[in-house]
Amino acid sequence: MKTYKNLLLASATFILCTGFFGGDDYNFKSSKSEGIGSFKVSLPYVKYEKYFGYVDTNIKPEGKYKNKDSYYLYLWVPAAIDELGVSMVSPAKDKPGKKDFVHSMFKKSMKKDKKAYFDTYLVLDKLDILDPKKIKDGGKVIKTLKTNDDSSELPKNPGGKRYNSILRHESKISSPTESLVRGVYRVSFTSFRGKVNGSYMATIGSNIPGIKVANSLEKLSELVN
């Protein structure tokens, strides 16, 4: 009986920690955990969306973060959620799937130099755009929700350093500016070790379907509407 229980525990742990939930080294887990006896494991997000992009000298910075050139991705979240997670890996390891979001220059740039990469730094901002019809009109930042530089959870970059990034934000009902409601969110990314140059894969984790990702509000509006 004891052996059977140990096997059951091992099987359950394997299911929670591996690809039975669609996870891999890049599909990072949420901040939620579930206990199996006295053992706890982190739970994966129910849904993952991936965006494949490339930054080189042809792409102009869209802003500044602590005096460093920064670039933007925009997210449409269609309903209130309990948590939003974002990771960025450079260079992009996986190949885009049919349902993934891909920058128009990604494939062309990868043919030129697929080995280029950068140290990622992420910032998650909440914007004041709630109506999908008003996405194209733009908006302003209400609150910076989370930032992250280096994460030990993701694989090392080609230089052997764990300079890839993950951030997670749990919705706070008591604070309207920090609650995760339907609307537009912005992911800013930059690098504090050199320039942003090379490919990347951004992964968005949540517990709802329907999140859209684009590199401009105009493109996001097209996807949503």
Image (spheres, helix red, strand yellow):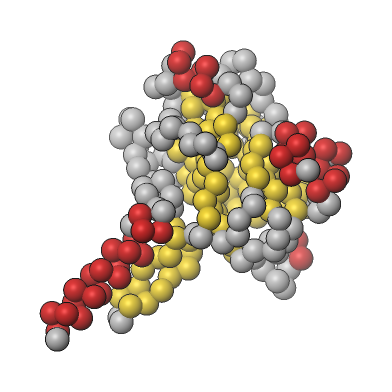
Query: Which of the image's four quarters has the C terminus?
Result: top right
Q: Measuring 65% from the left and 45% from the top, which residue is drawn there?
A: 212
Q: Measuring 51% from the left and 21% from the top, which residue is drawn there?
A: 107
Vertical order, 133 against 70 (above or below): below
Query: Which of the image's four quarters has the N terminus?
Result: bottom left
Q: Measuring 58% from the left and 36% from the top, which residue is drawn there?
A: 101
Residue 71 point in image, percent of width and height: 64, 32
Can see residue 183? yes
Horizontal side of 45 relative to 105 (left or right) equals left
Residue 44 point in image, percent of width and height: 44, 60
Q: Residue furthest front?
A: 98
Vertical order, 13 against 59 (above or below): below
Please identify the quarter of the rendering in which residue 173 is found: bottom right
Question: In the depicted view, which residue is nearer to us: 89 or 150?
Answer: 89
Please identify the quarter of the rendering in which residue 8 is found: bottom left
Q: Measuring 48% from the left and 36% from the top, which residue is drawn there?
A: 97
Q: Residue furthest top?
A: 112
Residue 188 point in image, percent of width and height: 63, 39
Question: In the depicted view, which residue is nearer to us: 128 or 50?
Answer: 50
Count the marks: how many?
0
Horizontal side of 170 relative to 128 (left or right) equals left
Can see residue 143? no
Q: Residue furthest bottom?
A: 1
Question: In the depicted view, which residue is nearer to us: 163 or 201?
Answer: 201
Residue 223 point in image, percent of width and height: 71, 39
